[in-house]
Image (cartoon, rainbow, N blue to C red):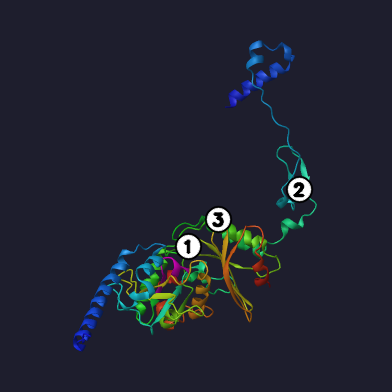
C-alpha cells in the first residue's frame, strides 16, 4: 500500500513539472485524476457548542466557542432517564430471569422522544422496561400516579390518577415529536 | 306430561358434575403442561379455560393443592429494574407478566421457609444481577376479586402452576380476556400495586422474622 502510494506520488510529481500538453498521449486518455475536495468551512454541530476550543484535524484551525458553561453543566434528570432507556437496547431475552422478551427498539425510541417532549421544569418520570419488551414511564408522588406504556407502533397506553381528580386511561397516538394534548394537562406538575 | 323421577334426576345431575369435574381435572393439568411457557401463555390459558375455570383443579401433581382464596401470595422484588431509583419502592412493571407468561408468586401460606429460601437461592445464583430487595404480600381473595368499575367479570386468575418439583409452592397470576392488552393493562398494574401494598414493601430482614434472610448464603446477602 505504501509503495504504490509512493510511486503514484513520484509520477504525479514528475508530471507536475511538465506542461499539461507535454504528457504522453496514452496518459492523457487513460489517466485518472485524483482530486482531494477542499475542506468544508469549519462548523461544529449544535450539541458541541460548549467547548472552549477545538482543533480541526483537517485544517488545523483552532475553533473558539464563546460559551463554555454549557459543556460543564450537570446531566439533567431527563437526560439520565433517556440514557437509562438507551442502555436497555443492549439487553437480550430473559433479562429479568423470568423469561422477558428483548426490548423493542421502536418502543424505546418512542419513550425517549416522549421524554424529550416533556417540559424541563416538570416532574421527572421513572423509566420502566416491561417483560413484553415495551418501554414505559412511571410517576408516583403525592399528587400524581401515572403509568405510560409505549407500544412501538406509535401509540401510548396510559393510566393516570391525579389525587382528588379521578382517573384517566386510554390509548393515544404519538408521532414522536409533539406531546399529545391529553398529557399536557394530566402530567402537569 | 312425563313425570320425572326425582332420584334419577339427582343421580343424573351428580353424575354429570362428577364427569365434568374429572374431565376438568384432567384437562386443567394437561393445560398446564401443554401450553408453551412463552409470552402468549396468559392468553392461551385464558382461551382454553375462560373465567378461571381451572382454579378449582390442581394444575400440577407436585402442587400441594388448589390456591385457596384465604391464602397469602408473595411477590418477591429481586431486580433493580423493578425498583424506582428514588424511592426504592417497586414499580408497576413488577406485575406486567400477568399479560405474558404469568406473574410468578409464592404461596406464602403454604410455603415453608426452606422452600422460599431454596427458590430465592436458585434465582439469585442463576441471575448474577439479582438481589433480594423486598417482598410484597397480598391476599389471594383480593387478587381474585379485582374488578373494573361497573363490570363483574373476573380479571385475574390465580393458579397453582408449579414449575418444578423443588418449588411446590409456586403459583402464577394470569389476566383474563376482560383485561384488554392495551386499554386496561396499566390500570390492572395499578390495582395490583394497591392490593400488594407496593408502597410498603417488606424488607428481607423483616419477612418471616428474618428466617429466610438468615438462611441465605453470605454471598447472596451481600449483593
SS at mark 2? strand
Q: Where is residue A100 shown, x and y percent of the image?
A: 45, 62
Q: Where is residue B179 shown, x and y percent of the image?
A: 47, 71
Identify the residue shown where x is 72% and y is 58%.
A72
SS at mark 3? helix
Residue B19 seen in the figure: yes
**Start-end of magenta stretch:** B96-105
Q: CA distance from mark 3 to mark 1?
A: 13 Å
Which numbered tag is attached to residue A106? Answer: 3
Are the residues tagged 2 and 3 within 8 Å (C-beta)? no
Q: Earlier in the sequence, mark 3 or mark 1?
A: 3
Name the side, left or right, on which B74 lies relative to A13: left
Can you tell which of label 2 and label 1 is closer to the viewer? 1
Q: Mark 3 belongs to which subunit?
A: A
Q: Mark 1 belongs to which subunit?
A: A
Q: Please state which of residues A91 and A5 is positioned toward the viewer in this rendering.
A: A91
Q: Mark 2 belongs to which subunit?
A: A
* Residue position marked by numbered label 1 in the rendering: A132
Magenta span contains residue B98:
yes
Which numbered tag is attached to residue A53? Answer: 2
Residue B204 seen in the figure: no
Amino acid at each position: 500500500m505504501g509503495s504504490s502510494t509512493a510511486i503514484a506520488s513520484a509520477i504525479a510529481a514528475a508530471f507536475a513539472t511538465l506542461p499539461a500538453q507535454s504528457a504522453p498521449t496514452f496518459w492523457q486518455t487513460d489517466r485518472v485524476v485524483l482530486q482531494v475536495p477542499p475542506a468544508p468551512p469549519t462548523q461544529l454541530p449544535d450539541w458541541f457548542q460548549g467547548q472552549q476550543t477545538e482543533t480541526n484535524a483537517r485544517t488545523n484551525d483552532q475553533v473558539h466557542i464563546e460559551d463554555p458553561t454549557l459543556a460543564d453543566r450537570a446531566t439533567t434528570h431527563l437526560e439520565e432517564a433517556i440514557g437509562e432507556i438507551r442502555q436497555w437496547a443492549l439487553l437480550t431475552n430473559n433479562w429479568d430471569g423470568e423469561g422477558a422478551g428483548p426490548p423493542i427498539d421502536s418502543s424505546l425510541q418512542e419513550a425517549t422522544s416522549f421524554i424529550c417532549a416533556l417540559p424541563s421544569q416538570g416532574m421527572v418520570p421513572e423509566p420502566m422496561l416491561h417483560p413484553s419488551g415495551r418501554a414505559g414511564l412511571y410517576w408516583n408522588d403525592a399528587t400524581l400516579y401515572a403509568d405510560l406504556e409505549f407500544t412501538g407502533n406509535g401509540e401510548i397506553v396510559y393510566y393516570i390518577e391525579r389525587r382528588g381528580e379521578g382517573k384517566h386511561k386510554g390509548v393515544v397516538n404519538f408521532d414522536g415529536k409533539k406531546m399529545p394534548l391529553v398529557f399536557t394537562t394530566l402530567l402537569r406538575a | 306430561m312425563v313425570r320425572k323421577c326425582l332420584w334419577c334426576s339427582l343421580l343424573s345431575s351428580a353424575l354429570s358434575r362428577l364427569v365434568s369435574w374429572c374431565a376438568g381435572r384432567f384437562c386443567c393439568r394437561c393445560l398446564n403442561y401443554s401450553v408453551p411457557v412463552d409470552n402468549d401463555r396468559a392468553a392461551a390459558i385464558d382461551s382454553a379455560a375462560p373465567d378461571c375455570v381451572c382454579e378449582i383443579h390442581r394444575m400440577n401433581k407436585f402442587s400441594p393443592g388448589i390456591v385457596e382464596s384465604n391464602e397469602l401470595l408473595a411477590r418477591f422484588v429481586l431486580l433493580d429494574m423493578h425498583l424506582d431509583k428514588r424511592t426504592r419502592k417497586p414499580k408497576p412493571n413488577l406485575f406486567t407478566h400477568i399479560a405474558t407468561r404469568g406473574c410468578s408468586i409464592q404461596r406464602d401460606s403454604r410455603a415453608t421457609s426452606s422452600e422460599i429460601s431454596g427458590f430465592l437461592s436458585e434465582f439469585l445464583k442463576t441471575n448474577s444481577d439479582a438481589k433480594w430487595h423486598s417482598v410484597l404480600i397480598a391476599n389471594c381473595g383480593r387478587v381474585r376479586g379485582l374488578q373494573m368499575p361497573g363490570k363483574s367479570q373476573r380479571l385475574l386468575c390465580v393458579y397453582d402452576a408449579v414449575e418444578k418439583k423443588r418449588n411446590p409452592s409456586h403459583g402464577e397470576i394470569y389476566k383474563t380476556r376482560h383485561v384488554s392488552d392495551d386499554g386496561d393493562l396499566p390500570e390492572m398494574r395499578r390495582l395490583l400495586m394497591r392490593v400488594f401494598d407496593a408502597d410498603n414493601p417488606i424488607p428481607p430482614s423483616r419477612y418471616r422474622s428474618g428466617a429466610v434472610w438468615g438462611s441465605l448464603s453470605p454471598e447472596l446477602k451481600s449483593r
